[in-house]
Amino acid sequence: MRFRLPTPVLAALVVAAVAVLCGLGVWQLQRNTWRNALIAERNAHLAGTPLSAAEAQRLPLGDLDYRLVALTGTWDIEHALVLANRARFGTKGEDIAVPLLLAPGGPAVLVDRGWYAEGQREAVLAEIAKSRVADTQGLARYVEGLSGRRTPAGTWSQISPRDMGATLPYPVLPWYVIEGHLLTDSGNSRPAGVLRVQGFYAYESDVDSLQYAAQWFGLAAALVAIAYARLVAAPRKERRRAAREASPRE
């Protein structure tokens, strides 16, 4: 004997499921509004005046992320840190991160000084060693809980003020800087004659909340259509058939 839920119970379950699906769709629309506001806010900072180190340190960490900063101090070339396996322009390469001492003895800020193709490390180290005086500008980034792993070769998997700072002989601030200026090109071609590629792009998000919202609303519509066919149209058709069969024949 086949078990079948009573129609009122099944209808109540459908209503609940549609409500949940529509709620998820509305949530994605709200996420889209929030994300667009975040993108606008962060990119508006890129048109502002860079913050000094003192101003940056006074800001809450969450408000500091994606702001321009202008830093002065001393480069600690001896403690340069290499980020390996960083592909750009279809080429395997590395990034070089150098601590910038804001004062003798620290604190320091980790600065990503750019990307270079694999095999150019010694040339890059020689280039950046030409000057110890730091007077630079870039984009401040703060990512809570950002971790990096040191490989057996001595390189790093990811820039991490917390983990890299634990290997340095002075305090390191919990945010880092991408040296350079705002880039407006597509980033698909490598600049000719440049040893290190520097700079950053405007903030964007690859999460399409509108697409997710459409999927949730689409599922809700499909469920309503199936429920209508199963709970309304099919019984109505069955009643008409039964009525025809029960009617007296001439």
Image (cartoon, grey):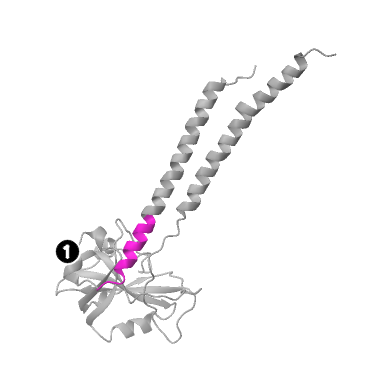
Q: Quadrant for residue 122, please give it.
A: bottom left
Counting every numbered tag in the picture gives: 1
Give x and y (percent) for residue 92: 47, 73
Is residue 219 found left or right of 47 in the rendered image? right
Residue 81 image offset from top left, x and y in percent: 31, 72
Q: Is residue 170 visible?
A: no
On the rendered structure, is 187 left or right of 1? left
Residue 118 percent location from the top left of the image: 44, 77
Closest to the observer, 185 or 32: 32
> Depth check: 152 or 237 in front?
237
Magenta stretch bounds: 35-49
Height in image: 147 above or below 51?
Answer: above
Q: Is residue 204 left or right of residue 189?
A: left
* Residue 45 is inside the magenta segment: yes
Callout 1 secondary element:
helix
Q: Is residue 247 visible?
A: yes
Residue labelled with disc 1: 58
Residue kind at label 1, given as amino acid type: Arg
Q: Residue shown at 43%/49% (left/top)? A: 29
Which residue is outermost to the front? 250
Residue 213, placed above or below residue 180:
above
Place of residue 33 in the rendered image (x, y in percent of width and height, measured from the top left): 39, 53
User: Is residue 190 inside the magenta stretch?
Assistant: no
Helix, strand or loop: magenta stretch:
helix
Give the image quarter of residue 98. bottom left
